[in-house]
Amino acid sequence: MKKNEIKKMSKDELLKNIDKFKKDLFNFRFQKINGQVKNTAQINETKKNIARLKTKLREINA
């Protein structure tokens, strides 16, 4: 997810995307345990996206 996309999001959109990425991360963990993950870089990218979204959410609330 790019910074420009994040800047344009409303508070509700940020919260929805955070939930979506958390579910994705949960699924990636199970796939990793079962050896089904093809691209392990997606796990780190998902974590970074969650952090970016939370940072923007904090800026809005401040």
Image: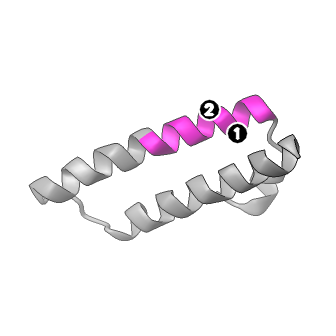
Q: Which mark is residue 16?
A: 2
Q: Quadrant of the N terminus?
A: bottom right
Would residue 12 be counted in the magenta stretch?
yes
Which range of residues does the magenta coloring cover?
11-22
Disc 1 to disc 2, how far (Cα)? 5 Å
Residue 24 locus on image (x, y percent): 40, 44
Tags 1 and 2 in contact by the CB under 8 Å rule?
Answer: yes
The residue under label 2 is which amino acid type?
A: Lys
Question: Image quarter for residue 42?
Answer: bottom left
Q: Say which element carries label 2.
A: helix
Closest to the observer: 61 or 24?
A: 61
Q: For the point 78% across and 49% down, which residue is it?
A: 58
Residue 17 locus on image (x, y percent): 60, 39
Question: Image quarter for residue 14?
Answer: top right
Q: Is 47 drawn above or below residue 6 in the view shown?
A: below
State whether residue 29 appears in this view: yes
Residue 25 locus on image (x, y percent): 39, 49
